Amino acid sequence: MMDDGDDRAERVGFPLDLWDTNGGTENTDSNPNGVGHDSADLLQELSQLAMEEVGNVCGCDLPSVLLRVGSPFLFQVPCDYESIRTNNEYEPRRDSDVSRNECVICNMVDLRQRNNVVRHYMGSMAQCRGGGGDALREAGAVNALLSVLWRLIVTKSDTNNSDCSPVALLPTTKSEPILNGPAMMFDLENLCNNHLHLRSIDPSFDVIVMNELGASALDHAISCLGSLRDLSCGSALNRAAVLAWTPPSPARYDTQCIENGVHVLSAYVNRYDKFEWEDILYLKEREFNMISPADEIDSKTPTDRGKRELRLLTNTLGAIRNTSHSTPDVCQDFFNYGLVDLLVWRLTSDDTLRNTQSTKTMPSSSLPGASRPWREACFRAAGSLINLAEKCPDVAYRLGSNRRFIYLLIEAWGGARAVVFDPNKTNKSTRGLPLLHLGLAAILYAAGNGALEGGLDDVMMQVLEKEKMRKRVAQTKEEERKCRQAKHK
């Protein structure tokens, strides 16, 4: 069960041999008094900064560009040094002005430019499949993407690596407020000379800039996860590269160590643990002043921030779904790291589904309807679990122990009609149901072999029986085909 991607935003076309966080030539005379400007003007100017075509990045060759993408973020460079734009090296600061790595605007532009590069080189399935995907892997794309995702969530307290920041750009929802991680990184009074004039544009400068920085971090993570999802689709070598990746230094996220790419993807699911779908969608925008986690949810309307967070989780689940396809060692590591329990919780919307084992009451539908924004994420989560069960018996046994969750997976595979059993109906046709996924078959066989209290019921037996009928029909057709070929010889 593979995921063929989604409709990502149109890639930004700009010269990729250009990379400069200064946002253009120095201009301290631009609107010194801030006359006639408002929030819209500030947002417009911020959106244009990442598109400025000034300076040479690191050459046009793919390995150099990917090395730059996966390198430490601008604010993670030691304050006594300033990142230069060639060979991914550092040089000492040359004056007493505010360094680019201390300027929040420069850091926002740096994130957006990295994001533009990812979207340009790996922004579509066509670029990530076949020979293109192999070339990207050999140039270091998988390593670069996972390094970015690792740097976004790991803090200096989690590791001894000086590349990490004191607060994560995308902090966990449990150990610290999810909203205001970026606000604790920068002194917003310190802007470099190229961006100092922006402070006069709008009195709400601090709030607007921190919101834009947080949105830039989310957008970058969304793009990286989408590219990782596409690279893992149809390429066993790329999936193996995800497991083989190792972080720049040992680190912990929440309570677990991150040692490979499987752990990074699991951490992005864990980031939303105990947040219901609505809670994610209604997350408030970031604010400069610290607020408590209890005040983070806006229960009235979906927010732009919430939509980004939901897309990030959806892309994470897509990457897990593709990475776990027919890869036993990856599947086993996902299980060992606790991903299965996270996904089961994520898919179950009430206590009945979470706890029921022996009840034979069949729900009308366990998956969200088409009007729910998280429907796509639910199907990707279900597909991930089915893939994991195919190659990991531990997953099959775990999932096969909950009757109503089995119904949910059957529905995800064959639709709502697949969980309907009518004893008065004599139609034994297999039409309308897809080929039984080997992962779902493994779950049903585990349920029938002792994992499920009470054993298989009529719905589950119907699924297995129709698959047997399908195989018999296919075998008969194949024998008839061979007979026809023999007659024509």
Image (tube, rainbow, N blue to C red):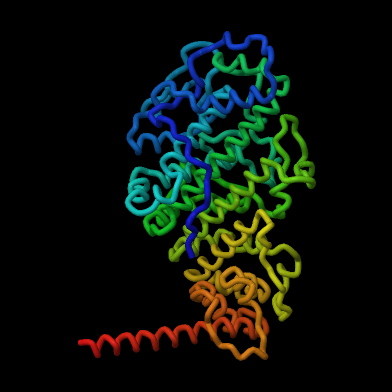
Asked which quadrant contains residue 139, the reply is top left
Residue ranking furthest to the front = 488
In front of the other: 100 or 394? 100
Residue 301 in percent (x, y) is at: 76, 45
Relative side of 278 to 240, left or right: right
Identify whether 434 is placed above or below 206.
below
Could you say which is closer to the camera, residue 488 or residue 139?
488
Viewed as shown, does residue 276 lie left or right of 50?
A: right
Image position of 203 (left or right of 21): right
- Report which quarter residue 168 is drawn in: top right
Image coordinates of residue 48 in percent, x first then y, are 54, 26
State the quadrant of the C terminus.
Answer: bottom left
Q: Position of residue 90 (x, y in %)?
A: 42, 24
Residue 472 visible? The answer is: yes
Using residue 387 as the reference point, say whether residue 132 is left or right of it.
left
Image point 60% across, 37% down: which residue? 169
Residue at the image position 49 percent from the left and 86 percent from the top: 469
